[in-house]
Amino acid sequence: MSKKKNSPTEKEPIVLTEWQKRNLEFLKKKKIQEEEEEKKLKEKLASEKKAQLLQNNLTEETPEDSSKTSSDDKKEQATKKKEKPLKVKKEISQRQKAFVKALPVLSISLFFLLGSLFFLSPYSKMKDFAVVGNKHTTLAELSEQSRIKSSDYFLKVLFSAQKYEKAIMTSNPWVKDVSLDYAFPNHFTFNVKEYTIIAYAQVQEGFQPILENGVRVTVVNQSQLPKDYLIINLENEKAIQDLIKSLTTLPKKLVEDIKSISLANSKSTADLLIIEMHDGNTVRVPQSQIEKKLPYYLKIKKHLEGTSIVDMEVGIYSTTSDIEAKQAEASKSKAEENQANSSEAQAETETTNPSIATDPSTNTQEQNPTDVSTQPTSEISTGQTEQSSASID
């Protein structure tokens, strides 16, 4: 029995070490890879052969076959594109997540840091100004009247624009409206709208412009006047203010036709104005009715022949200076006739009722206090003589 147990025919199981196991696995994997590479090479050679065959056949194929092959190729490419595997999103690391969370805080801190550095630098106080729409005002005047200081930050000017606009409008009589516009990085523009000149008042120093708001500005010389200008010869300041307001409501063409406006000094109508036009015509109209009646002049002047006078004091009618001169002569001669007739009538009454003559005896009687009856007669006679002399004069 012992001999049988120790016989060499019986095989015992071989125990492999860990390294041997790994080596066997490596050899198996290597063998598989070599087989796959051989397979790929064979497929590659087969595909190259097919490509050569296709190129050879292309010369022999008809256009229809070529179109079919191209369409097939396109379909194959489309299917390949569809079969492409979707990209798998990479997982974000803990460090990246922490950076994303801290990014808002870092950006805000960086912003404040840069802002602080900017305000500490001289660039924060640099300002560039320009003006648009001005004719009678300058950039230097506007900058001074706005009260903007060179030491002011440009952000202060940007956020306090209304304050500076109000300062300009209160101090500059020319400015009707102004806006301070900002452009990056530090450019500011005064957008100005000025009052228009309605008329001029003639003063000792020259001609003083009167704006549409009734305000008078700096005197100018005659050489600085425009070609056609309107002169107002009124002394009452309130009347000038009211007249300017009325002129602003009238048509612009009508106002441009006016040469001068003066007071007529009429006894019947205290506010009667004499308006001389550039075309040579004259208009008489009360100031209280100028807005209502003067616009009719544009229609009336089309029917006028030569220089005329349009009277709008009571109603509206036209006349000429010659006609008015004749009427004045006629009224004057009539007044002289009436005066002559009245003097003749008074002379006749004096001849029919002669006054009592005074002599020394009457004087002695007047001086005598006892004779009272003579005193009233002498007083009446002297009163009558004074009245007659006054009427003759």
Image (tube, rainbow, N blue to C red):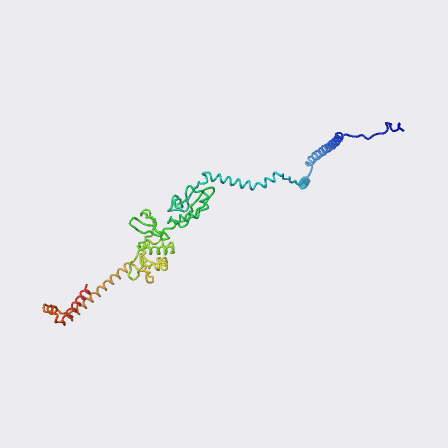
Residue 43 lies left or right of residue 168; in this view the side is: right
Point out residue 247 in the picture as x, y percentages from the top left corner: 36, 55
Residue 306 location, x and y as percent?
31, 56
Screen quadrant of the C terminus: bottom left
Q: Tell me the quadrant of the picture where the N terminus can be found.
A: top right
Residue at the outermost front position: 2
Q: Is residue 299 above or below residue 73?
A: below
The spot of residue 126 in percent (x, y) is 44, 40
Residue placed farthest to the right in the image? 1
Nearest the camera: 359 or 31?
Answer: 359
Q: Position of residue 104 (x, y in %)?
A: 56, 42
232 relative to 167 in the view: left or right: left
Residue 148: image quadrant is top left
Which image quadrant for residue 31? top right
Using the image as rendered, state which of residue 22 and residue 116 is in the foreground. Answer: 116
Pick whichever, 194 or 300, lies toward us. Answer: 194
Q: Is residue 241 above or below residue 112?
A: below
